[in-house]
């Protein structure tokens, strides 16, 4: 429609997701239900593989939810067209946190299947390491895990809820201040960094309860940010072929997303190398067992694979300006890096339960099951609002040249 001046007037209906989003939602739900059913069967058929595989799947998809929230808060702080075109993708991703809250319950109810400190028999054994007993009584126990799990998700969802609610209000009311977005994001990024670090200590580091690393949470923060940008590139490659995003997504924004991918590939590598170097230099008996587990039994080849294909090759490819400027080429590398994020989390978690290289069919069903449900929820969120926040100042600047 047009105004009296002859200029096009944009409406919410003009910016709604194309029909492909509904198709993807339906297909994702089918995959999720089938994967979930197969995973439940796996809990009975291969219990020795199920619980560590479930933790891997949970940590990957939770990381994607939190990564979307962190990148959204970064956007609210610094602004830029790079974030305007993916803002609703990020908001839809972070609003899957209620699903992840529910999906942690199987882990909570089966702590002894994963964590040695939660096994009553081991704690009652007089030969048990006194430090493990001390940790189990003071910090790592069911009540502590339960309280902190609820606290983490209340904080995460609280931040996501308000950012999402205020964004929805912008669609209805023009001229709203963006100060509250910046205020929430400035505090939120600090709170997110602290809470995810403690969550990783509770759920992943405690698989080897005596091992400590002060930089461990940063490894996951970098990985979650990388996952979020790769995910956005994949989704924008789908939506960018169709209206309305095809009219506003340019090579410049895609190039920016590629540069962010390059940044977080390097940050991930830097944190991993820093941890390894510090532990190697210290050579302390409390620290080196973590690497001993991952440099034997075939796991060393997975570590080498990560060095080459999570860092070296993507780093070299992302130096290409031409590759970063085209969504149809960048999407292949983004998809590969999402796969490598799963391999990285597998390498962090699985050796604690299986000293020798181990992979089971249930690893695939859990990733598909949780992922299918996550994606169905994501596309449901994405379809509920315009793909661009209609009255946001950044959106108005983006749309101005088109409608002059």
Image: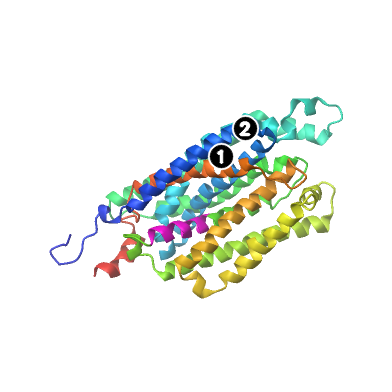
Q: Which residues are magenta?
A: 228-240
Image location of residue 378, percent across then percent down: 43, 46
Image location of residue 180, percent across then percent down: 41, 51
* Residue 147 appears anywhere in the view: no
Q: What mark, if any, has residue 304 been given in the picture? A: none
Q: Residue at x 74, y 33 (%)?
A: 117
Residue 140 magenta: no
* Residue 105 appears anywhere in the view: yes
In this rendered view, identify the residue nearer to me: 350 or 154: 350
Q: Are marks 2 and 1 in contact (CB under 8 Å)?
A: no
Specify the quadrant that holds the C terminus: bottom left
For residue 388, side relative to residue 155 (left or right): left
Eyeballing the image, is 161 above or below 170?
above
Q: Residues within 10 Å of mark 2 (few under 14, many from 20)?
A: some
Image location of residue 165, percent across then percent down: 38, 45
Q: Nearer the viewer, mark 2 or mark 1?
A: 2
For residue 84, side relative to residue 211 (left or right): left
Badge 2 marks a residue whose secondary structure is helix
Marks 2 and 1, the one that precedes in the sequence? 2
Image location of residue 249, percent across then percent down: 38, 65
For residue 8, side relative to residue 182 (left or right): left
Q: What mark, if any, has residue 152 been given in the picture? A: 1
Specify the quadrant that holds the N terminus: bottom left
Residue 233 magenta: yes
Q: CA distance from mark 2 to mark 1?
A: 27 Å
Q: Which residue is mark 2?
A: 43
Q: Main secondary structure of the magenta part?
A: helix
Give residue 209's quadrant in the image. top right
In this rendered view, identify the residue nearer to me: 393 or 259: 259
């Amino acid at each position: 429609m047009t105004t009296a001046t002859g200029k096009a007037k944009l409406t919410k209906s003009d910016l709604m997701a194309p029909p492909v989003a509904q198709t993807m939602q339906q297909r994702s739900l089918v995959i999720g239900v089938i994967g979930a059913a197969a995973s439940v069967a796996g809990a009975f058929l291969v219990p020795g593989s199920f619980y560590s595989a479930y933790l891997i799947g949970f940590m990957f998809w939770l990381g994607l939810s939190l990564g979307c929230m962190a990148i959204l808060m970064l956007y609210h702080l610094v602004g830029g067209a790079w974030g305007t075109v993916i803002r609703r993708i990020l908001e839809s991703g972070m609003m899957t946190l209620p699903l992840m809250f529910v999906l942690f319950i199987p882990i909570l109810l089966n702590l002894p299947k994963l964590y040695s400190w939660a096994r009553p028999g081991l704690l009652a054994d007089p030969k048990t390491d006194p430090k493990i007993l001390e940790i189990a009584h003071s910090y790592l126990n069911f009540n502590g895990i339960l309280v902190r799990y609820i606290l983490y998700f209340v904080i995460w969802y609280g931040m996501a809820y308000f950012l999402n609610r205020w964004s929805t209000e912008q669609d209805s009311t023009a001229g709203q201040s963006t100060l509250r977005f910046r205020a929430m994001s400035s505090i939120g990024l600090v709170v997110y960094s602290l809470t995810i670090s403690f969550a990783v200590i509770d759920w992943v580091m405690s698989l080897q309860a005596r091992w400590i690393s002060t930089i461990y949470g940063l490894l996951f923060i970098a990985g979650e940010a990388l996952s979020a940008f790769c995910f956005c590139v994949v989704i924008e490659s789908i939506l960018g072929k169709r209206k309305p995003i095809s009219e506003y997504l340019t090579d410049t924004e895609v190039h920016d997303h590629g540069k962010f991918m390059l940044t977080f590939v390097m940050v991930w590598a830097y944190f991993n190398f820093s941890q390894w170097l510090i532990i190697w230099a210290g050579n302390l008996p409390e620290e080196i067992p973590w690497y001993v587990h991952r440099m034997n039994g075939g796991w060393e080849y997975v570590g080498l694979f990560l060095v080459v294909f999570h860092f070296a090759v993507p780093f070299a490819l992302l130096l290409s300006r031409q590759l970063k400027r085209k969504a149809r080429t960048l999407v292949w590398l983004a998809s590969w890096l999402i796969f490598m994020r799963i391999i990285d989390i597998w390498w962090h978690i699985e050796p604690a339960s299986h000293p020798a290289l181990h992979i089971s069919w249930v690893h695939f069903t859990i990733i598909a099951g949780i992922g299918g449900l996550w994606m169905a929820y994501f596309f449901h969120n994405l379809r509920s609002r315009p793909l661009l926040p209609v009255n946001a100042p950044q959106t108005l600047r983006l749309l101005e040249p088109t409608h002059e």
